[in-house]
Image (cartoon, grey):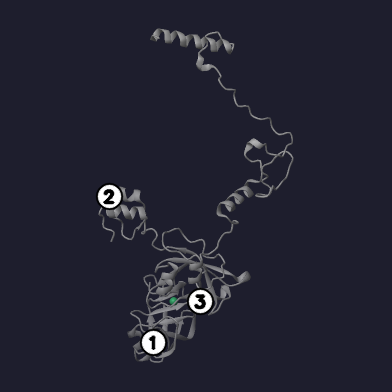
Amino acid sequence: MTADEREQLAELIADEIRRALGRADGAPTRAVPWLALPVRPAPPERAGEAPAWSGAAQSLGDVAPIRRPSASSHRADPGSMTAAIRAAAAGQGPERARPLPAMAQQGGASDGRPTARRIAAGSRRRPAGVVEVPIAVSRRHLHVSPDHARALFGSEALEVHRRIQQPGQFAARQLVDVVGPSGRLERLRVVGPTRAETQLELSRRDAAQLGVDPSLAASGALQASGGGLTLVGPHGRVELARGVIVAARHLHLSPDDGERWGMRDGDRVDLRCGHGARATTWHDVLVRCGQGNATELHLDEDEANAAAVGAGAIARLVRLYEGDRVRRRLITERDLIALARRGEPIPHGALLTPGARDRARALGLDLA
Ligand SMILES: [Zn+2]
């Protein structure tokens, strides 16, 4: 059979097929429907029941309850559907806020209540359980410089009246009176040992009584501190030109607790304490973490009174702001490649994702 003959034969067969299908009009063979189009089954007779072909033949009532059963719809409420799907995917109910067992154990009181959940984003290890700290109430007191101690008491040696919780510090036997424009406070306790600079810590109420308006400051930050008060000791007097502050509330944290709870010196936290209508959340509490600190929240008397808490009460961490989060940039692999292209070093203290870390090693970049 030649090629021409094969062509003719094929043409004849094609004609025969067209005729058989009643389409001998020369329409292109490609348009011939060889198979019947799929036909969608008719909708079910009874409303409220999914048709078999929908793939949802089983009732959803046992997975997600239908909130408003109606004859016109078989759909479950989207909210309960989502919850049910998540539950099914997790192999359990949609339980939230369950602390990790290991962390709860470390967190001390592990009653499983979800308080430390709203922790700012960051790659540091974060407390998943409850973090509770004891409260100490700081009454007005004086830290005194050696010079001022000599002037007030005749000697710079302070005698221990009783130890306080913060390591190395003590309430001294020495007392002073403080005289201000509108009043006088007697028998203020000196807290030892002596410091480089005299610092008088008052509550706002004390300050009002004395007739001064010192600024709120962290202990030791005396740049903006006030003066205008006279210290009166058994040996002599000292006019204070500066060093008077209302001490900002702060959380002392032992290095161990800092490590355990993923907190560092300079972080800020929100802590909640008190009960009922007096329950109070203290915002923006400065964390002082490191050697020489024992874990304790220091409130002044005004604050303690406002929340109706005393020494020995418990405050609970509700939020952690990483103090250095601006400086501690998160570097992804993509960021790292961009840095390397620009020839820039990895920012100091940056947090690297595992991908970025591997890439940095591969590029021979300094990870110190
Ligand atoms: Zn303190």
Q: Horizontal and vertical percent for residue 181? A: 46, 79
Residue at screen point 42% across, 82% down: 142
Residue at screen point 39% across, 10% down: 3
Q: Helix, strand, or loop for circle 2? A: helix
Q: Which of the two discs, 3 and 2, labels the residue nearer the N terminus?
A: 3
| Residue projecting furthest to the front | 1
The residue lying toward the viewer, choosing from 311 and 73, is 73
Identify which amino acid the numbered label 1 is placed on: Arg
Residue at screen point 40% across, 74% down: 255
Gap between marks 3 and 2, in whole Å?
47 Å
Q: Are marks 1 and 3 in contact (CB under 8 Å)?
A: no
- Mark 3 neighbour class, 10 Å CA radius: few under 14, some 14 to 19, many 20 or more: some
Give the residue pinned by disc 3: 134
Q: Is mark 3 within 8 Å of ligand 1?
A: no
Mark whose residue sits in front, 1 or 2: 2
Identify which amino acid the numbered label 2 is placed on: Ala
Q: Is residue 232 visible?
A: yes
Give the residue pinned by disc 2: 340
Identify which amino acid the numbered label 3 is placed on: Pro
Q: Are marks 1 and 2 in contact (CB under 8 Å)?
A: no
Which quadrant holds the N terminus?
Answer: top left
- Mark 1 neighbour class, 10 Å CA radius: few under 14, some 14 to 19, many 20 or more: some
Gap between marks 1 and 2, in whole Å?
63 Å
User: Where in the image, quadrant-wise, is ligand 1 located?
Assistant: bottom left
